[in-house]
Image: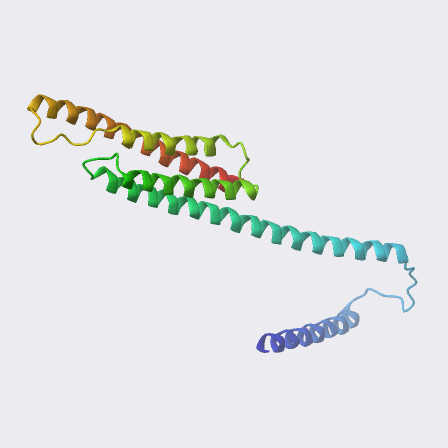
C-alpha cells in the first residue's frame, strides 16, 4: 500500500512538473507551435509495434524463467556431487583404518557409493545437464569400481604369530596398495571437480 501511495505521488508530481515546464517554455521561448497539427495513424504500424512489444516482453520473461530453472537444476546436481564427494571421503577414510579391507562392510560401502553416484549421473543425463556418453561421467563410474577392487586386493595386517619376514612382506604390499588407493582417490576427486566445472560452464 505504501509503495502504491509513493507511485501515485510521484505520478502527480511528474505531471505537475510537466505542466509547469510547458507553461514556462511557451511563455519564454521564441519557438512557435501551430495549433493544428495533422498526422495520420496507420493501424498496421500500430498493430506491428504492439505485437513486437508483446513478443519482446514474452520472450524475455520466458527465457529468463527457463534460464533460472536451468541454473537451479545445475546447482542442485553440483550440490549432489559435493555431498557425494564428502560421503566418499568419510567412508573410505574409515575403511582405511581397518586391519582387513576385504569384508562385508567394504562391499556394502562401495555398493552404496556406486549406486549413489550412478543415480546422480543418471539424473544429470535425464535432465540434459550432461550428455549420455559424457567422458568425465564414464571415468567417474570406472574409477569407483577401480578403487573398490584396490580395497579388496589389499592384504590384511599380518598375524602377530607370523615371522618378521612375512610381516615385513605383507606390510610392504599393504602400504603399496594403500598408496594406490590414495592416488586413485585423488584422481576421483579431480574427476568430480571437472564434472562440476563442466556443468557450471554449460
Q: Position of residue 3 (x, y in %)?
A: 59, 74
Left or right: 120 with respect to 58?
left
Quadrant of residue 179 within the rendered picture: top left
Q: How many marks?
A: 0
Foreground of the two, 33 or 195? 195
Q: Tell me which residue sits at (77%, 74%) in the image.
A: 23
Q: Tell me which residue sits at (89%, 66%) in the image.
A: 34
Foreground of the two, 64 or 132? 132
Left or right: 188 with respect to 68?
left
Q: Is residue 154 above or below residue 197?
A: above
Left or right: 66 with respect to 159?
right
Left or right: 10 with respect to 25?
left
Q: Position of residue 128 (x, y in %)?
A: 57, 41
Q: Quadrant of the N terminus?
A: bottom right
Q: Tell me which residue sits at (28%, 41%) in the image.
A: 105
Q: Is residue 64 above or below residue 143?
A: below
Amino acid at each position: 500500500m505504501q509503495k502504491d501511495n509513493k507511485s501515485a505521488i510521484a505520478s502527480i508530481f511528474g505531471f505537475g512538473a510537466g505542466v509547469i515546464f510547458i507553461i514556462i517554455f511557451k511563455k519564454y521561448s521564441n519557438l512557435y507551435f501551430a495549433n493544428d497539427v495533422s498526422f495520420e495513424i496507420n493501424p498496421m504500424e500500430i498493430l506491428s509495434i504492439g505485437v513486437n512489444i508483446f513478443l519482446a516482453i514474452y520472450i524475455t520473461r520466458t527465457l529468463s524463467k527457463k534460464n533460472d530453472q536451468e541454473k537451479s537444476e545445475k546447482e542442485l546436481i553440483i550440490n549432489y556431487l559435493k555431498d557425494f564427494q564428502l560421503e566418499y571421503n568419510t567412508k573410505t577414510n574409515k575403511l582405511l583404518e581397518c586391519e582387513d579391507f576385504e569384508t562385508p562392510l567394504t562391499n556394502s560401502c562401495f555398493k552404496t557409493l556406486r549406486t549413489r553416484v550412478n543415480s546422480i549421473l543418471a539424473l544429470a543425463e535425464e535432465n540434459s545437464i550432461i550428455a549420455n556418453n559424457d567422458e568425465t561421467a564414464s571415468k567417474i563410474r570406472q574409477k569407483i569400481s577401480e578403487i573398490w577392487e584396490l580395497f579388496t586386493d589389499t592384504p590384511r595386517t599380518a598375524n602377530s604369530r607370523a615371522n618378521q619376514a612375512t610381516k615385513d612382506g605383507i606390510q610392504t604390499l599393504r602400504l603399496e596398495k594403500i598408496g594406490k588407493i590414495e592416488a586413485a582417490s585423488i584422481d576421483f576427486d579431480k574427476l568430480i571437480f571437472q564434472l562440476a566445472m563442466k556443468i557450471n560452464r554449460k
